[in-house]
Amino acid sequence: MTRMPELQERNSGTFQHANWPRKGIFCPSLAGLVSFMLAVGIGCGSSGSQNYSSTQQGLATPPPPTQINSYFGTTGDVWSTSINRTASQINGEDRTLHGIQFAGSIIGTFNSSNGFLNLSLTTTPTELTDQKIGFALEIPGRAGLIRYGDIFHALVPLAPADGCTIIGGTVTYEYVTLPGASVAAAWAPTIDTTYGTFQITTDGNIWNFSTITQFTLSGGSPANPGSGLPAGFCGIGAAGYAVTAASNSNNPPLATVTMGFGPSGFFLEDNGSSQATPVGVVPSNALGAGVGAIGVVQPSGALNTGNVVGGQYLGFFYEPGIHAGGAETQLASFGCSGVGCPQPSSPTAIVGGVFPNTGGTSPVDEPNMPPSQNITIDLGPQDPNNNGLYPSAMITISGVSFPAAAVVGNLEQKYAIFLIAEDIIDNTPLGIYLFQQ
């Protein structure tokens, strides 16, 4: 089955900042530090973050994007990725699997292909033996999506890891569950968390989380809610700068939560689904099910849904676990324009699909070919109490409709759409992640 993506609007909660003093990384207690280092190899050190006393709400004005950026990512494992646009080089590593030994380094080059970064991998770890291709979609220094290998490999969402994002006052984020392929990272839409919101306040490098809400796909309260988030701190480690929150629970011991916050509003959480050590640690389930969560800063006002679905998007169509535990990750495009494009079924819908591939045992994507137009995302009504949240969205693929939920936000005047749905035909989660072009 073939499938597709879209984005547009500014976070009005940003504020200007001047010459705030730099501070060192907050060093946690020994127990918290041990849990933190076991999860992602992070230790105390000097910081590139800033402290401030401003009472203004929102995110600080993002720094100008650069050509070389580092990212934290998750598939349930914690990943690090560096994208160097000056040298057209990419480096990555599964830090959970390979720690800091560099035994699992991925090295490659890339060129531009219809908006995507087309990867040519020259060095790969054992689990990617014979894999020479891959694709990425990057908003430099803001957010990204990457797939190392062919379409049967997992999608790795990417949050910037070059510094600690500056937050003023109380900021609200909204998210959808990020599903995984393994049984441990499964998502049961009737009892597990599908979407929700939370709030953040910061004090230097200390991050406090509150007002966490969680809902199932049908909008009810989950039977298996997330455990919540203890206070965390922002520091640097093997995967770059990240916010971590180590649980004090010992029965059973819960994994450390790792989070990435982009300067323009992107959010990514890893709940330790595949944490290797110490033995006996179980996923934190901090915000819900799956391997974690993906989302955005909540817009300050209701979005114009017509503007959202009127854009053109690129991204990924992702079905983890569809092939007996193996993923299917396809390049996608949404927002067809011009003569011959199918008309959306409603004013809140957008049409698209995935790009073709060569097929075979190791399919090669063809993003320069016309994408299919057999998928409709109908966002439906926006939640009246949560700007940018669409809890009753619907996905229709070749005439078959699936229930879904989506969050939409603005990453510097361009929309991002993150959606999770229940594929009732293949009985697997379905994610669509799109950036407006």
Image (cartoon, rainbow, N blue to C red):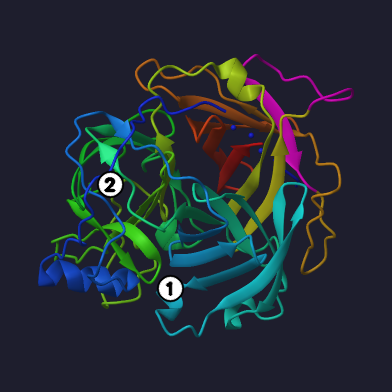
Which residue is depicted at the point 19% across and 66% down?
A: 253
Secondary structure state at the residue bearing disc 1: helix
- Asked whether 143 or 88 is in front, the reply is 88
**The C terminus lies in which quarter of the figure?**
top right
Marking on residue 226: 2
Q: Earlier along the polypeptide chain: callout 1 or callout 2?
A: 1
Residue 342 highlighted magenta (yes or no):
yes
Residue 310 highlighted magenta (yes or no):
no
Q: Position of residue 35 (x, y in %)?
A: 22, 70
Q: Give the mark toward the camera: 1 or 2.
A: 1
Q: Position of residue 71 (x, y in %)?
A: 47, 59
Which residue is depicted at the point 14% across and 64% down?
A: 28
Secondary structure state at the residue bearing disc 2: loop
Marking on residue 95: 1
Q: Are marks 1 and 2 in contact (CB under 8 Å)?
A: no
Residue 140 visible here: yes
Q: Position of residue 364 (x, y in %)?
A: 79, 62
Hey, what amino acid is under mark 1?
A: Arg
- Asked whether 118 or 165 is in front, the reply is 165
- Residue 180, compared with residue 53, is above or below; it is below
CA distance separating discs 1 and 2:
24 Å
Residue 214 visible here: no
Q: Quadrant of residue 189?
A: top left
Label 1 crowd (10 A; few <14 / some 14-19 / many >=20): many
Marking on residue 314: none
Q: Position of residue 417 (x, y in %)?
A: 55, 35
Q: Farthest residue toward the right?
A: 339
Magenta-drawn stretch, dominant element (helix, strand or loop): loop
The magenta span reads: 337-355
